Amino acid sequence: MSITLDQPRTSDIAARILRRHTIIASDGMNGALCVAAELQSCGHLVREFAVDVREGVTYSTVTCTVSMTAFEADAFASQLRALAPVVSVDPY
């Protein structure tokens, strides 16, 4: 049996857990859709996704649960904070 580098190591699989994030975005539905598009293109497995957009409220809330390692979680939050409508990204 041979082990190749493109196969996931057991330690990588064990370190990958579901991490919940709450993302606050401005610009109503457009801001939430911008966050959704970024989540779709980021390459992580999104297990749960919920959006709360309300009339008369300045910010919308996107809550998602994403499978990733602790290292990926830091990069994920930075990537989302770079989006113009994103006000904050908080681990749940």
Image: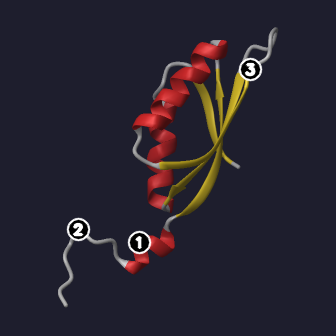
Callout 1: helix, strand or loop? helix
Look at mark 3 in the image and give the residue it sits on.
53
How far from the left and from the top, in percent, is residue 46?
Answer: 54, 47
**C-alpha span from label 2 to label 1:** 12 Å
Residue visible at 51% across and 61% down in the picture: 70
**C-alpha span from label 3 to label 2:** 41 Å
Amino acid tagged 2: Asp
Amino acid tagged 3: Val
Contact flag, marks 1 and 3 (Cβ < 8 Å): no
On-image quarter of the N terminus: bottom left
Taking 27 as reference, is 37 above or below it?
below
Q: Which residue lies furthest to the front in this view?
A: 1
Nearer-N-terminus badge (3/2): 2
**C-alpha span from label 1 to label 3:** 36 Å
Nearer-N-terminus badge (1/3): 1
How far from the left and from the top, in percent, is residue 92?
Answer: 71, 49
Corner quadrant of residue 87: top right
Look at mark 2 in the image and give the residue it sits on.
6
Look at mark 1 in the image and give the residue it sits on.
12
